[in-house]
Amino acid sequence: MKPCYNDDSGAIDFDANGYRLPTEAEWEYACRCGGAADGLSEGTKLADYAWYADNANGRPHPVGQKRANLWGLYDMQGNMAEWCQDIYDKDYYRGSPESNPRGPAEREGVRTEVCAARRIVDLRAAESFRPTTRAADDSGMSDVCFQKDAIGFRCVRKAPAEPK
């Protein structure tokens, strides 16, 4: 696999087939299973899919203990906040590209390649769950081993080309 990240320059090659953090738009698309809804089976309860304030005893849980969303992805809502590739900009989506937005290029001199926003999908109350909820949290640490236990990440990669 070709790496997505250049260790020397910090540049990201979105066309490479290696692993990387998802953009916020990719994360939301996967959470919603490509649609406008929340990606959960109709008529089911959030508690079947997610850990949140009312059922988690104030702590994260191992992945896969609840039902997967319609695309087979576990813990897309609830349980933990997740790092995404983009720099956080609360107004970015007002003027972003309609198709596959990759986040702002810069914020206060910080390049996208060296800073990530996080998706807030953590242990909130059930009535506040939305796939579109987002916020920023710069780790501010040189060693992520000392970061909070309630922030996780997913890896994504470009889908292989389909045979012709």
Image (cartoon, helix red, strand yellow):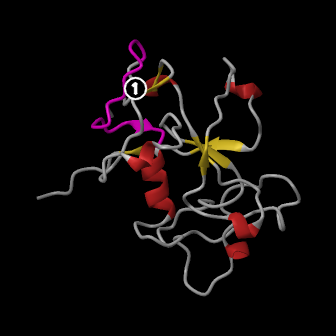
Tell me, yes or no, whether the highlighted magenta stretch contains residue 103: no
Left or right placement of residue 111 versus residue 59 in this view: left
Q: Amino acid at mark 1?
A: Tyr
Residue 113 shows up from this direction: yes
Taking the view exactly as shown, the residue that stands out farthest to the left is: 164
Q: Position of residue 35 (x, y in %)?
A: 41, 70
> Is residue 65 visible to the viewer in this orientation of the structure?
no
Q: Quadrant of the N terminus?
A: top left
The percent coordinates of residue 159 (x first, y second) are 31, 51
Q: Is residue 117 left or right of residue 92?
A: right
In this picture, is 19 found above or below 55? above
**Crowdedness near tag 1: few (<14), some (14–19) or many (≥20) residues, C-alpha within 10 Å:** some
Q: Work out which residue is located at the far bottom of the displayed protein and give it.
A: 43
Residue toward you, 78 or 125: 125
Q: Kindly report the secondary structure that dominates the magenta region of the rendered protein.
A: loop
Q: Quadrant of residue 23?
A: top left
The residue drawn where x is 68% and y is 26% is 144
The mark total stands at 1
Queried whether the magenta region covers residue 11, the answer comes back as yes
Identify the residue shown where x is 77% and y is 40%: 149
Q: Please give the name of the residue rendered at 69% of the width and 59% of the height, measured from the top-left corner.
A: 78
According to the image, label 1 marks what residue?
5
SS type, badge 1? loop
Going by the image, does 25 lie left or right of 163? right
Q: Which residues fall within the magenta stretch?
A: 7-22
Quarter that holds the C terminus: bottom left
Instruction: State whether residue 21 is above or below residue 30.
Output: above
Q: Residue at x 73, y 73 (%)?
A: 47
Q: Residue furthest top?
A: 8
Residue 70 position, x and y percent, is: 50, 73
Q: Position of residue 36 (x, y in %)?
A: 44, 70
